[in-house]
Amino acid sequence: MSAHNLRGFDLLSSVRHNKGTAFNHQEREALGLRGLLPPAVFGLDDHKRRALANIRRKDSDIERYVFMQSLMGRNQTLFYRLVIDHIEELMPIIYTPTVGQACREFAHIFRQPRGFYISPSDKGDIRTILNNWPEKDIRVVVITDGERILGLGDLGTNGMGIPIGKLALYTACAGIPPEQCLPVMLDVGTNNQALREDPLYLGTPIPRIRGEDYIQLVDEFVTAIQDAFPKALIQFEDFLTPNAYALLNTYRNQVLCFNDDIQGTAAVALAGVYASCKPAGKQFKDLKVMFLGAGSAATGIADLLKVALMAEGLSEPEALARLWFVDVSGLVVKGRTDLMSHNLPYAHAHTQMPFIEAIEDIKPDVLIGATGCPGTFNQSVIRKMCEHNARPVIFALSNPTSQAECTAEQAYAWSNGHVIFASGSPFAPVEYDGNRYQPGQGNNAYIFPGIGLGAIVAEAKLISDEMFLAAASTLAQCVTEEEVAAGSVYPKLTRIREVSLDIAVAVAKTAYAQALAQSEPPLNLRETIAQRMYDPHYE
Ligand SMILES: O=C([O-])CC(=O)C(=O)O
Ligand SMILES: [Mg+2]
């Protein structure tokens, strides 16, 4: 923590240095705080206890979210200590699924500005206005334009909840100091008319800017960030598929950046598939995988699975032949005229057919849903997967919980407990037929914090596919037999800092090995990274 010369109310209103009633009597005397605080002196543990009691007495998760956001704005040490020490209870509040509802209601629960907003009228001025940001050593930027917020669609500037939530996890899960994080909303309008007509809407109430004007604004932003914060990693988040791919393809080989929905989701799904092989009794290199939904998340997973299968010795055509897509029009096959370019490698020569028939015909080992559409893994789908698999692997990845392709309970019940199930959003443990199952949460929160930490330490120039592959196999190796026996193919959330550290080590090693690092490799990489991790305590 840096030295400061704040005193009195300025000190109490410093989110970074405030510790409220934990200032002791000497500090109160020396720092001009006498009379400004109630007389009793408390410690961080007392503060945690009081805050938790306040959180638990609230009636709804959205109220808990509002409480946590306010806390983040007045005492960051307490906020992060609480999240780290109670991650299973609080991650679903500050992140998925509650953050989804918070985005829907963002304009109405708004209290205090947080993060950076760029609007069309800022064109030409982005570099200059970045000087208004008080911190100068930014290492991670998460930017969205709000067009595909989780599986909830176009939420315009209400989507700012997502960059804020993602960066809170960078800090809580991987120890990136809060002052090195910058949430950004690219406000380019919204095609959600209800939002434009909401009198409290916080963005520019115009239809979305498209085409050249859009591309130029993003490009001005990327250039400005590189100039203002040359070490910053840019994470693109919750863009609609065509823009997500266009931006990733433009910048991935030039700028330290990645798209979390394409690449982060891919790595977390690959890790789950790796970890499922043992309980399913199968070899990774033999798997056939079917995707429902052909957007950025599903295609990103397929692209990384292809790389992973090729790493096992398959040729590219052999790897592609294992990966099958189904979308709203049925099986994705050669000759269909309604496909986007990212779907074409997976459009195989085959008869077009509906989803259920495709499962019957192709007999996938693994079924992955990334549709944003609840109910699409119905009873017949799960039963069909069980017909040719003793232990079918089924991942319902759409977020938040309300959008999952099926619930955990349905997956266990309809498969008579045989499914190896994971979901993008958390589900409570399920009791079925006398057994208790703890489904894993295949959320990219297991991946992006560690990717960021590794990239920052190595001062990587780019984020490569190999880094995501390394992150995925590291994550899979973190899963214990106990966790698998309990029903999960992911590590328990309570170990996420350890897991993120392991991933960061693997990512940094990959950066050094690929000559993509700009820092010297430290003697003891793991220790160096561990020491860098922000661990909140009162000074
Ligand atoms: O935010 C999450 O929980 C995962 C994610 O990136 C998405 O669903 O877009
Ligand atoms: Mg996302």
Image: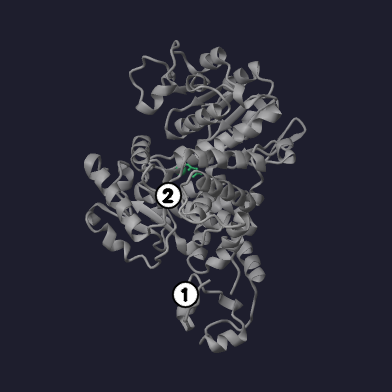
Q: Is residue 183 left or right of residue 56?
A: left
Label placed on residue 461: 2
Does residue 468 appear in the picture of this structure? yes
Q: Residue at x 48, y 83 (%)?
A: 8
Indicate which disc residue 13 carries: 1
Local packing at callout 1 (Cα closer than 10 Å; few below 14, some 14-19, many 20+) is some
Task: Say which quarter of the image contains residue 131.
Answer: bottom left
Q: Position of residue 489 (x, y in %)?
A: 65, 37
- Position above or below: 520 against 134: above
Q: Position of residue 420 (x, y in %)?
A: 65, 30
Q: Which amino acid, by three-letter code, is at mark 2?
A: Lys
Residue 205 seen from this side: no
Would you say the residues marked 1 and 2 are in contact, meaning their CB atoms lie under 8 Å apart?
Answer: no
Image x and y of residue 454, in percent: 53, 51
Q: Which mark is residue 474?
A: none
Judging from the image, what secondary structure is the residue with disc 1 in? loop
438 and 184: which is toward the camera: 184
Q: Quadrant of the C terminus?
A: bottom right
Q: Residue at x 64, y 63 (%)?
A: 53
What amino acid is found at the position of numbered circle 1 in the picture? Ser
Mark found first going from the N terminus, 1 or 2:
1
Q: Residues within 10 Å of mark 2 (few under 14, many from 20)?
A: many
Picture quadrant of residue 278: top right
Image height of 35 relative to 236, above or below? below
Kind of element beneath mark 2: loop
Front residue (pair 358, 343): 343
